[in-house]
């Protein structure tokens, strides 16, 4: 790949194979976010079924805060 740098054409230092590994990193990041989301929802559901509504609310608030910070 060629890039313009100070009116000169130079070869890029990034090889095309590194771009493919970057997409894998995004895939694993998405898998991790989904796993954390499912765990948070499951924790809230289990705590609510056990009658621990205050703890379920606390877990829900922390899970929501985590995702609002990650996706903003």
Image (tube, rainbow, N blue to C red):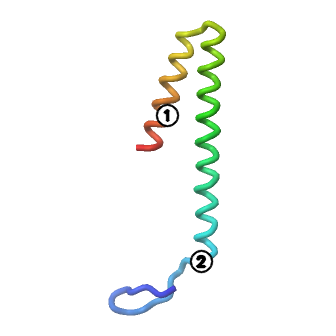
Q: Which residue is mark 2?
A: 16
Q: Is residue 66 left or right of residue 23?
A: left
Q: Residue at x 44, y 38 (%)?
A: 69
Residue lying at the far top in this picture: please name it: 51
Q: Residues within 10 Å of mark 1 (few under 14, many from 20)?
A: few
Q: Is residue 68 above or below residue 56?
A: below
> Which residue, as the protein is rendered here, is positioned at the far bottom?
8
The picture places residue 40, in percent across and down from the top left corner, at 59, 28
Above/below status of 43 relative to 22: above
Q: Residues within 10 Å of mark 2 (few under 14, many from 20)?
A: few
SS for tag 1? helix
Per the image, the residue denoted by label 1 is 66
Q: Nearer the viewer, residue 2 or 39?
A: 39
Residue name at image x 42 percent, y 92 percent:
9
Which label number is shown at residue 6?
A: none
- Residue drawn at (66%, 9%) of the image: 50
Is 64 on the left-hand or right-hand side of 43? left
**First in sequence: mark 2 vs mark 1:** 2
Residue 47 image offset from top left, x and y in percent: 62, 15
The quarter of the picture where residue 23 lies is bottom right
How far across and down, in percent of the image, does residue 33 sit?
58, 42
At 58% from the left and 70% from the top, the residue drawn is: 19
Residue found at the very far left of the displayed protein: 7
Q: Is residue 34 above or below residue 61?
A: below
Residue contact at pointers 2 and 1, CB within 8 angstroms? no
In 3D space, how far apart are the residues under numbered discs 2 and 1 (Cα atoms)? 34 Å
Q: x, y percentage for residue 1?
A: 52, 85
Of 13 and 21, nearer the camera is 21
Q: Quadrant of residue 36?
A: top right
């Amino acid at each position: 790949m060629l890039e313009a740098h100070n009116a000169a054409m130079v070869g890029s230092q990034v090889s095309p194979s590194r771009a493919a590994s970057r997409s894998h990193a995004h895939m694993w990041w998405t898998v991790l976010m989904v796993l954390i989301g499912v765990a948070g929802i499951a924790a809230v559901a289990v705590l609510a079924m056990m009658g621990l509504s205050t703890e379920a609310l606390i877990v829900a608030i922390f899970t929501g805060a985590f995702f609002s910070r990650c996706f903003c």
